[in-house]
Amino acid sequence: MDFVGEHILSVDQFERTDIDQVFRVADMMEPYAHRVKVTRVLQGAILSNMFFEPSTRTRVSFGCAFNLLGGDVRETTDMGSSAIAKGESLQDFARVISGYSDVIAMRHPDEGSVAEFASASRAPVINGGDGTNEHPSQALLDLYTMQKELWSRRKTIDGLRIAVIGDLKYGRAVHSLLKLLAVFDAVNVHLVAPPDLSIPMDIVEFLQSRGHSVTTFDRLEEGIQSVDILYVTRTQEERFSSQQEADRYRGLFRLNQTVYTKHCEPNTVIMHPLPRDSRRSAQELSEDLDSNPNLAIFRQTDNGILIRMALFALVLDIVDRVDDYAAGVTWNTRKRRS
Ligand code: NCD
């Protein structure tokens, strides 16, 4: 795909070559992310970071990624203090905000809302999570992390064996990840969830239509055997109709070092989109795994910066100019959507 000026709303937009392109640019960003090199290529550009649902790492890493490219970030985090609270439509809101911004990252509690906003936006919009639907930048950083972790184990995403565990019904990170994995070859997926929190059927059908193997488990100990990667998720309590209902699922699946040692192959990678629920009653991913070198959760968050820098660079068409800072070249607004 031609990324320039595009909205990034869904992983459905990505073919394998597009994923490779994002990862190549992400690799290029490493010296800048680690402050070995400095660029101000986006000097004068503004990111509007609009997060209308709780978020720490996604919001902050979008902001840091933009700052590392030299741009400025404006944060809006409270729907109650935005004009949406006065009844403004998402489209009017987009017409206004996109006039102030060069790119927009947005999270919103309703499925499809970010696409609706984007339909009226004059600046490219990146979906930071829309309800239970999608979280494309998370899926890309997860896949990028998987590729790196597997590389050191002499394995690839083609032929990957993965267990996705937890709330697969409401978890948008898993929805995007599984759809993205579907563009690879011969993936073997273990779905480990309570029956009431199973993955939407269309995602299973999509994986199967692409020739992947999908097996369902409702016992953690069975589902985590014979895989390369465990992808653990939190019960999305905020999506349930009542706290009482959400409480029924809290603490059902708990991965800890004892369970891991007993049931997993040696060196199985452990991932989680975070935040993990560390309350005693939950603990889907125990802190006793923190000293396990296969725990990749903080490598995932570090990789999030690289992936988000890459997305900005591609969408704003500055990939070839990141190094030009020394020559005094700065970003300009020629590439806006009309
Ligand atoms: C995820 C999300 O918001 O969907 N978090 C994140 O962005 N890293 C997962 C979650 O909240 O459980």
Image: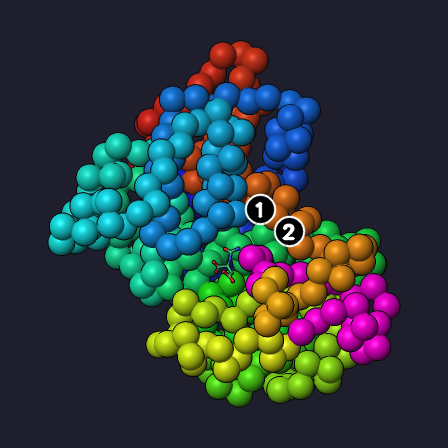
Q: Which residue occupies 37% across, 55% down?
A: 53
Left or right, 178 with respect to 201, comes to right
Q: Secondary structure at mark 2?
A: helix
Confirm if mark 1 falls within 8 A of ligand 1: yes
Hey, what amino acid is under mark 1? Gly
Q: Which residue occupies 76% across, 62% down?
A: 288
273 within the magenta span: yes
Left or right, 184 with respect to 6, comes to right
Per the rendering, the mark at residue 277 is none
Q: Residue 330, image x and y in percent?
A: 44, 19
Q: Is residue 264 visible?
A: no
Badge 1 density bin: few <14, some 14–19, many ≥20, Cα 10 Å = many
Q: Residue 78, image x and y in percent?
A: 31, 47
Q: Are marks 1 and 2 in contact (CB under 8 Å)?
A: yes
Residue range (magenta):
254-277
Per the rendering, the mark at residue 304 is 1
Compare residues 195 and 96 and report the one nearer the observer. Answer: 195
Compare residues 262 and 305 and report the one nearer the observer. Answer: 262
260 within the magenta span: yes
Q: Which residue is mark 2?
A: 300
